[in-house]
Amino acid sequence: MVLKTFGWSFAVTALGLVAAVLIGGWTAFGIVLILSILEISLSFDNAVVNAGILKKMSAFWQKIFLTVGILIAVFGMRLVFPVVIVAISASLGPIEAVDLALNDADRYQELVTDAHPSIAAFGGMFLLMIFLDFIFEDRDIKWLGWLERPLAKLGKVDMLSACIALIILLVTALFLAPQAHLHAGSADKAETVLLSGVAGLITYLVVGGLSGFFENRLEEAEEREHEAEEEAKAKGKEISAGALVGKAAFFMFLYLEVLDASFSFDGVIGAFAITNDIVLMALGLGIGAMYVRSLTVYLVRQGTLDDYVYLEHGAHYAIGALAAILLITIRFEVNEIITGLIGVVLIAWSFWSSVRRNKALEAAEGKADPSDDKTEVSSGV
């Protein structure tokens, strides 16, 4: 199972490290290895959240996620995206931007860094909406019951997540962005942050809304299909699945790609603290992204989220922390180690709580047969 799921990741790692040695020797090898570890540590929570979505998709779309999706993740977000940002912010043509990235690494890094407020605002708002929608939803199983119960009650207010997100964006633009210049002569960033944040919010609402719409349609179609299958079996006939599954899966795939893009922002920006060589950056972050993808599929196939029910909670709290950090970095510098550790600690804590819950349920089953395994269980925190 491990080799089957992570086989491509191992192959990409070998090819990437060999390419690094050929490009820049053992120094480049070390840089690519460090970048790979950085990406994995920053994006582990991404894998957990992705797994919660991917488990609803068929094996075919899981393969698409690992093949076409990884091409988008590596070449789109880790290679093309920084070049596009430079082209837009510096009013350069695509060819000029690529030439700048390859031949003037210092200027290229300066332009990407200068564009950080807009990148952070877009990604921060997208991730913030994911976090807010999660904590305001009433769930049968709660991790931090003392916090999640009152938040679930507040979540009954329509559009509360969007309202809170817009308030946070406004506060960010007013108090962080005006002084977020990264070198002498930088213009006021408030308007840029505000527009980029609104764009992130709109992207979440559009992509998430379409995904949710088609997912609901898919569930309705599956119910009708099940009824039709029962009738067909009674008559000795067979029926085929409808085309709606493709639409629903496509929009869920699109949602996953936008989600991955938002997670990759901090990794791309943080990579400049290690190197400004765009080729080495793409190799290192690409290897890391491949492992995150493989880990996502592994979690789905092993049923890890079903066995350790608080993992998804921990990952979403890590998303909330990452969203806050992205917005803070509009003005203040936050070390990537802190960003990675926060996510690791929250997920490790949720895993430990899940283990405790499973042991408690096993002990309870030894004494009596519980009437409902799906009832609310708190971690006791």
Image (cartoon, rainbow, N blue to C red):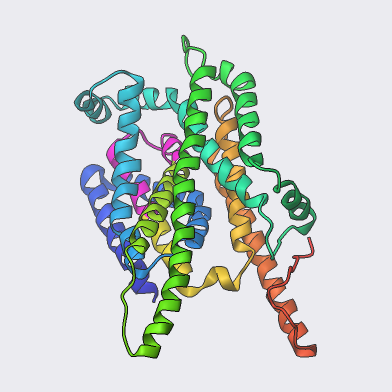
Q: Give the residue furthest to the top.
A: 185
- For the point 23% across and 29% down, the residue is 98
Whole-percent x, y for residue 250 in the image: 35, 55
Foreground: 121 or 338?
A: 121
Relative height, residue 231 to residue 34 (above, below)? below
Q: Visible in this render: residue 87?
A: yes
Horizontal and vertical percent position of residue 364: 77, 83
Residue 286 is inside the magenta segment: yes
Give the residues drawn in magenta, as a range: 265-289
What residue sits 74% from the left and 69% below the top? 377
> What residue sits 33% from the left and 67% below the top?
242
**In this view, 230 is above or below 90:** below
Location of residue 163 by image quarter: top right
Where is 112 relative to 202, above or below? above
x 26%, y 20%: residue: 92
Q: Nearer the viewer, residue 323 or 52?
A: 52
Answer with left or right where residue 76 lies relative to residue 316.
left
User: In the rendered image, which quarter contains the N terminus?
Assistant: bottom left
Q: Quadrant of the C terminus?
A: bottom right
Q: Main secondary structure of the magenta part?
A: helix
Whether residue 281 is visible here, answered yes or no, is no
Q: Position of residue 198 (x, y in %)?
A: 51, 29
Find residue 240 and report its image quarter.
bottom left
Q: Is residue 290 magenta?
A: no
Q: Does residue 129 appear left or right of residue 221 in this picture?
A: right
Residue 334, position as x, y percentages in the image: 57, 34
For the residue pair 147 and 137, the one nearer the viewer reads as 137
